Amino acid sequence: MAELIKIASIEGGGTWGRIGNWLVAGLTSAGFEVELLKRGAEIPEIALRVDRGEADLSVSTTFGARAAYLGKHPYEKPLAINGIAEIQYPNHWFVHMIKAETGLSSFHELAEKRPPLRLCLPSPTLLVSYPVKAIFKLFGIDPYSDIPKWGGEIITPFNEIPEMIATGRADGVFRENSPMRYDVSQLAEMRFFQLSEQEVRRVTEQLGVQPGLITERTYKNQRDPIRTVDAEGFTVFARRDLSAEMSYRIARAIDHHTRTHYISSCTFYSPRFAVHAGAPLLQGAAQYYRERGYLPQH
C-alpha cells in the first residue's frame, strides 16, 4: 500500500493552488498516496494544521515559513515545522508605486495629506498583507481603515490591477509583485516610495522578512535603487517529526518526479536554490541536497 501524505492547502487557487497541484502531481508520480486538505485561509490556519499534526506538508511564502518557525507575527509561538524546499519567485518585492499625477512621492506625504486614493493592496486576510500593514504602520497609517476614511478605496483583486491602473480606476499599487508578472509602470507614469534602512530593519525584526533592494531601472522612470522588503519565494514545509527517510524521499520526489520545474511564468523549482527555505531543512531533505552537492558535506 502506498504511503499517505496529507497536504494542507487553502480553499482558493492562485499561485498557492498551482504549487499545491504541482506538488500533488509529483508526489503521486513518485508512488505516494496524496490527500489534499483544502481548508481555511492561507495564514495562519494551514501552518497550524501542520504544527498540530493534522497534515504532513504545506506551502507558504518563504517569509511566512520563517515567521512560523521563529514564532514571529502573526504566530504567538514558534511552530513545529521545518523546510523541505524553496520555490523560486525572482524579483519578487513589496513595491510601493503611485501615479505621478497624485503629486505624492513618500509615505510621509501620504500620512500628512490623507488624500482620497484608490490603492491596490492584498486582501487583509492574506499572509502578504502583514508586511503591507507593518510598512504603513511605520507612518501611523492603518491602510484598511484609514484609506476609506479619507474617502478612498481599497482594491484587492490581484489580476485586475493592470486594467485598473491603465483605465484610471486605481491610483497606486502597494503590495507584493514581480515585474515578470506585470509591470504597471509601463501603463502610467509612476512614482516609487522608498523606505529607510531603519524602517526596513523594524519590519524585518517584527515579521522575519528579509530586506530587499529593487535595482535602478527595473521599472520605467525608476532612476534610483529602491529600498524595500523582499517578498521572496514559496516554501514547502513539513511537520518537524517527519522521519528523515520520509523527508529525503519527498525532497527527491520533488526534484525527480514533478512534471516540470517551472510551475508558472514566475515560479520555478531548482535543487540549487531549494535549500534556501525560510525554515531550516529537515534532516532527510538536507541529506538529499547534500548528496546533490548543494549543501556542504559534514
Image (cartoon, rainbow, N blue to C red):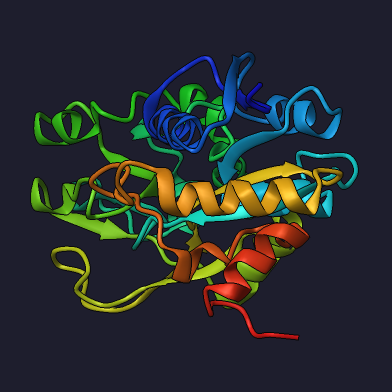
How many numbered marks does the figure carry?
A: 0
Residue in the image at 54% along x and 28% along y: 144
Q: Eyeballing the image, is 10 above or below 213?
A: above
Q: Eyeballing the image, is 271 above or below 28?
A: below
Estimate the x, y position of residue 108 in percent, counting from the top left: 50, 58
As drawn, is 54 to the left or to the right of 195?
right
- Residue sticking out furthest to the front: 1
Locate the C terminus by quadrant: bottom right
Question: In the image shown, does 10 or 107 lie closer to the viewer?
Answer: 10
Residue in the image at 19% along x and 26% along y: 169
Locate the N terminus by quadrant: top right
Q: Which quadrant would residue 160 be assigned to in this image?
A: top left
As drawn, is 52 to the left or to the right of 2?
right
Residue 255 seen from this side:
yes
Residue in the image at 51% along x and 62% along y: 274
As drawn, is 33 to the left or to the right of 202?
left
Estimate the x, y position of residue 199 in percent, counting from the top left: 62, 67
Q: Which quadrant would residue 133 be assigned to in this image?
A: top right
Residue 199 seen from this side:
no
- Residue sticking out furthest to the right: 77
